[in-house]
Amino acid sequence: KQEVTQIPAALSVPEGENLVLNCSFTDSAIYNLQWFRQDPGKGLTSLLLIQSSQREQTSGRLNASLDKSSGRSTLYIAASQPGDSATYLCAVEEGAQKLVFGQGTRLTINP
Amino acid sequence: EAGVTQSPTHLIKTRGQQATLRCSPISGHTSVYWYQQALGLGLQFLLWYDEGEERNRGNFPPRFSGRQFPNYSSELNVNALELEDSALYLCASSLGAGGWSDTQYFGPGTRLTVL
């Protein structure tokens, strides 16, 4: 059974810092990995999707990497801003469009 | 372009009742997904519908059911509600797998409270 773990569970950093969120998964037979952002009480916003054949994806200040063989992904956020405060979720697709989510990292950027 | 919409925003029911949640996908999307986000359990996959057919189902009891209409909108029904069904129910849509994975776009969710 696929299990997705995100570390740390919560992170608080001052504005302007670069930071890394971690995601690990137990079964490397995945189709893709996605990073999402969730604001309190709201739905999810897809940030980046990395296909299993890719190593990384970039969007603005965000960069996500994937190492399928070791079952790891990182989300790098450069020059963090207070508006980046949210919960970040990692999810792997293990086939038939089923996403398995981690528990998330709650990020707080302090002005 | 309108995103995924869900109704109602909030729903309050009592134990044993039935709840019906609705979802309208992004125009042009044929796949609809349902997820449950319960406190302390994280997001769990419930159901996937594509072209009106149920394609995949998560580890939930049969009292969780749904359907997809010809216009690709979807309904999630939860029968015989239990207290632990209280959660945020998220709907997502995508273009339609056709054998390939594609990005799922999420709606704002329906907050179901069972008293």
Image (cartoon, rainbow, N blue to C red):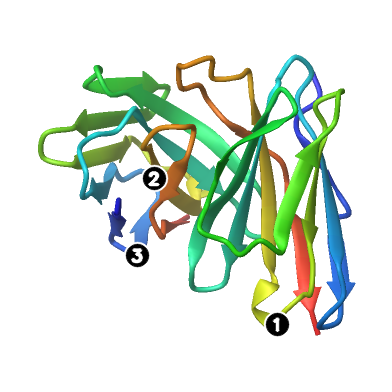
At a point 72% along the width and 79% down the height, the residue shown is: B82
Q: Which mark is residue A90?
A: 2
At a point 34% along the width and 57% down the height, the residue shown is: A13
Task: Tell me the chain of label 2.
Answer: A
Q: Position of residue A101 (x, y in %)?
A: 42, 50
* Dot 2 amino acid type: Cys
Quarter of the image for the N terminus of chain B: give it.
Answer: top right
Residue under label 3, please give it.
Answer: A9
Task: Tell me the chain of label 1.
Answer: B
Residue B72 placement, left or right of A10: right
Report, in whole angstroms, how far the alpha carbon at label 2 lies from the one at label 3.
12 Å
Q: Are marks 3 and 1 on the same chain?
A: no
At a point 63% along the width and 18% down the height, the residue shown is: B95
When the figure is inspected, residue B71 is found, relative to residue A40, above or below; the finding is above
Instruction: Say which element carries label 3.
Output: loop
Q: Residues within 10 Å of mark 3 (few under 14, many from 20)?
A: some
Residue under label 1, please give it.
Answer: B83
Task: Tell me the chain of label 3.
Answer: A
